[in-house]
Structures are given as structure tokens and as C-alpha cells.
Image (cartoon, rainbow, N blue to C red):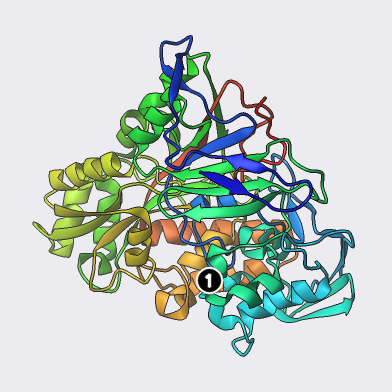
Amino acid sequence: MTVMHSGAGRWWLPVLASLSLGVSALGASGTLSAQTPPNVLIVGQIAEPKALDPAQVTAVNDFRIMMNLYDGLVRYADGTLDVEPSLAREWSISEDGTLYTFTLRDDVVFHDGSDFNAEAVVFNFERMLDEDHPYHDTGPFPLAFFFDAIAEVEATGEHEVTFTLDEPYAPFLSNLAYPTGLIVSPAAVEEHGENFGRNPSGTGPFRFEEWESNSRVVASRNEDYWDGPPSLEAVVFRPITDANTRVAEMLSGGIDLMVEVPPDTLASMEEDPMFEVYEQVGPHLWFLILNMKEGPFQDQRMRQAVNYAIDKESLVDNVLQGTAEVADSPIPPAFEWAYNEELEPYPHDPERARELIAEAGFEDAEITFYVTEGGSGMLDPVPMGTAIQADLAEVGLTVNIETYEWNTFLDQVNPGLEGKADMAQMAWMTNDPDTLPFLALRTDAMPEKGGFNSGYYSNPEVDELLEKARRSVSRDERAALYRQMQRIVHEDAPWAFIANWKQNAVAGANVENFSLQPSFFLLLHEVEKP
């Protein structure tokens, strides 16, 4: 089929309807090479997006698309998690850390032609945070509490916006750079209402063209982008949920770039001159949520037993083939300043696991285990789930696996495991040491309160430490609080800590200027494909 933009300076974008592009040649490595459209980047995604409204979604899979359609007031500097200007030229912070004033760019328009200004920024945050806002019903907004500290957001000039916080909030700027803080067009929200997530409009380097469910999302070059137009004419994001199918498409030339490459494929691609392999350590944690509201994992001894029973070294070395390290904490070691280096991973000790299970009186217990087919940062979830099942069988536990497609899996897990499962796989890639524990371990982050504490963990001391850390304006003080929190959580074992992943991607050798980001997002503004 053909996608068209009308108007001067726009173009016809040839994209085959099935995107099963014809094989045209044999590559030098002996793999089949398809002819993808010139100057059009075909990206193999791990799943269908849930929506293209940044305020509505939580998965990195979706963020990888949206970071190319939208901008925030600030963004992460290339190769870091440090914040730099984006739609805001500059900002100031009051001495008490409760007043943030942003001077906005005055040369930006949304893709739909409407003006970007301070009122648009106010609209975005009030839409998420104010239940009485006329477009609050276009949600839900699951990460809105990234911005709970905002008491008021006000347009203090046409291109100046001021946020008043009810208390100091250390992660505020970092959260503004996160996709939840991306700025959408108020005019597009007003036009499309609840369907805005299928009709997105932002200010980013690429304009949304079409979304054909379970086939592709197409975005074209924004010639008027305030930071300079991208080289690529278009990007096509294809959802390919099966990892082996993604690999086959990469080998045949049906896609130009794929993320989250299976470990057993990575080594062979590194040796192939047709491909460029990218790897980078980032703030990632793969873990098991344990249901503490009902069933055997209400008992701390059972939770510790699972941590002892699982052979994490074997998972990392054999299933993940060295593409990750064993985890021990809810804060990944990529956050060097906040990570507690004194912690040690639970060792693989089946005998100790059996002792704890016997003490708790749960010999021969049956465990329901939710596993996903694949998803954002989920590594190799089915083989990992099977290996974990075998490890727990070794210590006398019968584990029944239920497997779900990624978005269905999230719909099952995020509302909580009560009445469903005893444990579930999960992975998070985060922007700040505060993010994962605050959103998934606090008492007030349980699902019925809008959070992601799907295992119902509650420890008042942890709650207090997390609250203090986010209110502190001293990094040293925050680090001390986080390290103390990690010790407690390690002992309480609300999760089974499994792996910290080294993210990866593979691109065709003709893809230039691509790099991975510690945020785990795909930033394609500078990418070229001659």
C-alpha cells in the first residue's frame, strides 16, 4: 500500500501492505537479503503497542515508538540519564526545591499545526492529575503519580510555565524526561477524545501516519522539527512477538533493526559482517513477584526459599548466555551512587530452601506461575520460566505455568495477583533509583491504589525510607536511605531477584549513527540508512 501526506513538502511513502518484502539477493554471509525501502527504517518490535498516548502506557515497547513522536520539556542527554533542555530552553528551581519555572521554545508547533505553548503544557498535566479536567476521562493514566508532588501548574507567560510542588521531590526533572512527561497536542486530544491513543500528535522528529493493528505503526519525517529534520524519510515499527521470528526477519532482511535479541543468536550475529551488534548496561531488573496476600508466599521463609532454590547463575550463564548478571536488589547496580554494594545475591542452596519450606509447613505445595511469551525487557521468559519451574521442583514445589501474550500478561499481573497466581515474572527498566521501589514496593502502591505493587508487599519502614529519599535534595542522603531500604527488602524477599540485563540490539550494516541508550528507548532522530 501507499501512505500519503498531502501538502507541500510531503511525499508518498511506499510500504508494502504485508511488509513481507521480497527476497532480492543473497548476502555475503549466505543469509537471504530482502530489499527494504531506501531511507525507510523497519524496526522489529517485541509486541503490539497498547496505545500511542504517552500518559496511558507503561511498557518500554510502546515508549520506543513514542520517544520518536513526542518531546518533553526536558530529555535525557545522549548516552546518559542526565537531564538537558528539550521543549524548555532553560529552567530555574527555588532554593527550597518546590518551585520549577521553565522557559519554553517559541518556535515549535505540534504535528497537527496547533501551537506549542505554556497552556499546552498546563493541559497535559491537568489532564493527568485533575479528575475534574474535561479530558481526564481519556485515560487511564497509570503513571500519573510520577507527578503527585505537583500542587499547581500555571502558565505564567505565553512561553513560561511554573510548577509548584507540595514538597521537594528529587526525581521531578528525571520524571519529566520519562515518556509519561511527553507533551501531546491538546487540539488532538480534544478532537479524538478516548481515541487519541490511536491518533497521536506530538512535536517529535517523526509524525504519526498510520497504525494497522498487529502489522505496523508508520511514522514519517517531520520536516519542521525544531531540532532539525531527521535523515530517515520514515520509520516502520513492526510487532513481531516471537523472538525466533524476529531473528528470521533480521536474517532475511525483512527488518533493519531489532531489539532484545535472543542470547543464542547474539554471538552468531556478532561474527556476521552483515550486521552490527549493540550492547549496553542499563538500569534493568528481571524478577519474580511473589503474592504476599494469600497462599504460601505470605510466609517470609517461603519467599526466601524461592530465592535460595533458583539457580540464578545457571540462568544467567546458560539460558541468557552471559547477557546479564545475577541480581540482588530492587535498585539495579547501573545506579552506582544509590546501589548497595554490600548486598550479595541469594546463593543457590537447595538444601537451605528445603529446610525453610519444611519450617513453613509447605512441603509439596502447588504454585501457580504466570509467564509471558515475551515483552519489554523480559529477556527469554519461557525458557527462564521452565528452568525456574525445574529448580522449584527440585525442592519439592509443584509449579504450574500459565503463559500469556505480553499485553494480556500485563492485564493479568498489573491489577494484582490475588485470586490468580502465586508468582509472576516481571521486568522494569527505570530512570531513577526511586522509580521501581516507589511504584512497586510501597504500601500505597498496591493495585487498588493505582500502583504496581502486584504482590501486596507492605513494610512501614520501607515506606518511610522511600518517602524521605524522594523529598531529599541531597544525593548523598538519598543514597544512604536507598541502601538502607535495599537491605530490608533483600531480607523480606517480596520478590525473587534474578537478573540485571545488558540490553542489546542488532542492525543491518547499512544502518548508521544508531546507538543504544541507558533509558532503553530507541532514539532515531540521528539514524541514517543510505
Query: On the picture, is 521 further left or further right than 25?
Result: right
Query: On the picture, is 304 further left or further right than 393?
Result: right
In what quadrant of the picture does the C terminus appear? top right
Query: On the picture, is 168 further left or further right than 482?
Result: right
Residue 267 versus residue 111 in the image, above or below: above
> Residue under circle 1?
195
**Dot 1 crowding, Cα within 10 Å, few <14, some 14–19, many 20+:** some
Q: Residue furthest bottom?
A: 132
> Residue 144: x, y in percent?
58, 73
Depth order, front residue of 135/307: 135
Query: On the picture, is 110 further left or further right than 410?
Result: right
Residue 162 versus residue 346 in the image, above or below: below
Question: Residue 426 appears in which quarter of the rendering?
Answer: bottom left
Can see residue 94?
no
> Residue 161: x, y in percent?
84, 73
* Circle 1 SS class: helix
Image point (64%, 33%), residue name: 515
Can see residue 13?
yes
> Residue 472: x, y in percent?
71, 67
Residue type marked 1: Asn
Residue 467 versus residue 360 in the image, above or below: below
Depth order, front residue of 131/346: 131
